[in-house]
Image: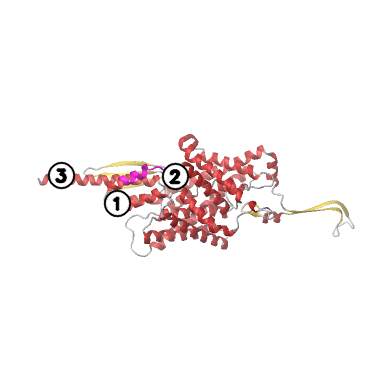
Amino acid sequence: MNAFLGLDFRFFLSQAVETRRKFLIVMARALLSFGAPSHRIESQLSSAAEILDADTEFVHLPNLVIVSVRIHGCRSTRTYFVRSRGRVALTSLHRVHEVYRDVIHDRLTAREGIEALKYCLRTPPIYSLFTRCFLAFLSASTICALSFGGSIIDMWMSGICASVLQYLGLNAANRSAMYANVYEVSISIIVAFAARALGSLPGTPFCYSAISSAGVVLILPGFTILTSALELMSRNLFCGSVRIVYAIIYTLFLGFGLTLGSDFYLVLDRRAKRAYYDGINAGQELFVHGNFTFTNSSVPSQILAGTLGRHDSQHALSLLYKGCYRDPDWPWWKQPFPWWTCFFLVPLYSLFSSLSNLQTFKSPQLLVMIIFSSASWTINHIVALVLPGRTDIVSATGAITIGILGNTYSRVVGGTAFTSMVTGVLFLVPSGIAQGGGVTQNYTSSAEQYSNGFALALRMISVASGVTIGLFVSQVLVYMFGTQKHAAHMAF
């Protein structure tokens, strides 16, 4: 009788361990699918395996988690490969973290956690394709006026470009593996072609730099570079180096697509090509006709007849605002937004960005994201006025601000630090790029074109480096005192 009871107990124990291991495998798929911070995935899974006594090891590679399970009773292991390529989904990721925390603290069994995670994985995106395209329109329109100096008519055009970009990315690129390989280059060509055509209209009602920069801001690899910097700081050298090289090459492809689209239109429109290479003829020009006597000439009483002209190039440069020429005599709809509009543009962009990353509207977490993002942008903007041109230091101060707010919110209130911080962190990337001169730059040769592409990549690396240092410093400041967390920390 005792033998049968011992056999049943060992069978029950082995089944419980297998259920916990299955929970960890499903957990790995959920973290990859919903865009969890990649430098935290391995530590989260290892911490959960240790607490659940699952005797499992993990190796995280880009878009892949290798799970090694030790088989009790024999000297062998079972290996699982969990592959998933997802995007940031804030609501689903917050739910996954809640399930993870409930299972770790024995508020849910491992089997109940598996069912909850599978439900999250089966659930379709909370917004339809049309809604996500409309949110992309609102996000690009707002960031065009806020960071790239666009006017009210530039906002509409950049929003339309971003909507087309979002539609092709969610629909055509997902259906065709062949088109997915050239998606970013093709959309950058379309955006640059449309922006150059609008910027070449008589009277220059549109700004090419504002429309093209805001139109492609959704596909900039700023988050990828930030992730790679965080992984390098976490000593995950393989994933970090792979991602940062990919992001730099990706930026060159993106710059090449923008250049190709702009040049293609200039080939079709010779008038626009002449105007582009002649530059902006908006300086103060003074012409005087008649006879002129040079009093300091080596030949006495030398008289010349003709026309003298003077061009003030500094006046033309003084009318440039974030890469856009703005004449003060132009009507209001061709002027950039005044500074006081930031008081409602910043919260609006934070709202649209959060919703674009699949955050539910009826959620208290959304208000927290908007407040944290607005506070981070405010500190970032103030420091940028004091230290112009230092995008690394400016980004670091904004990152420290949102890092302290997010980690304090997680420690005191019990919320998810990563989801509350991600909107503000993503806000720092276009802000830093705009402070460095925007996405698009003028060029006169192919060598200068690729130099501009490298310069854009270096600006993003500078911003990501500052954000990385700021996030790690803020985490140390918050968790330096008090009790330590037993589970892994889900934050940047």
User: What's the colour scheme?
Assistant: secondary structure
Q: Residue 90 vs residue 319: left or right?
A: left
How many numbered discs sit on the rendered protein?
3
Which numbered disc, 3 or 1, marks the residue that appears first in the sequence? 3
User: Percent position (x, y) of residue 281?
Assistant: 72, 49
- Residue corresponding to mark 3: 7
Tell me, yes or no, whether the highlighted magenta stretch contains residue 453.
no
- Residue corresponding to mark 1: 103
The residue located at (42%, 58%) in the rendering is 406
User: Percent position (x, y) of residue 156?
Assistant: 58, 47
- Foreground mark, 2 or 1, reads 2
Name the residue at the front extreme. 362
What amino acid is at disc 1? Val
Q: Is residue 179 above or below residue 97?
A: above
Q: Secondary structure at mark 2?
A: loop
Q: Secondary structure at mark 1?
A: helix
Q: How many neighbours does mark 3 have within 10 angstroms: few (below 14), some (14-19), or many (20 or more)?
A: few
Q: Residue 6 vs residue 21: left or right?
A: left
Q: Main secondary structure of the magenta part?
A: helix
What amino acid is at disc 3? Leu
Quadrant of the image for the C terminus?
A: bottom left
- Foreground mark, 3 or 1, reads 1
Tell me, yes or no, whether the highlighted magenta stretch contains residue 117.
yes
What residue range appears in magenta?
115-125
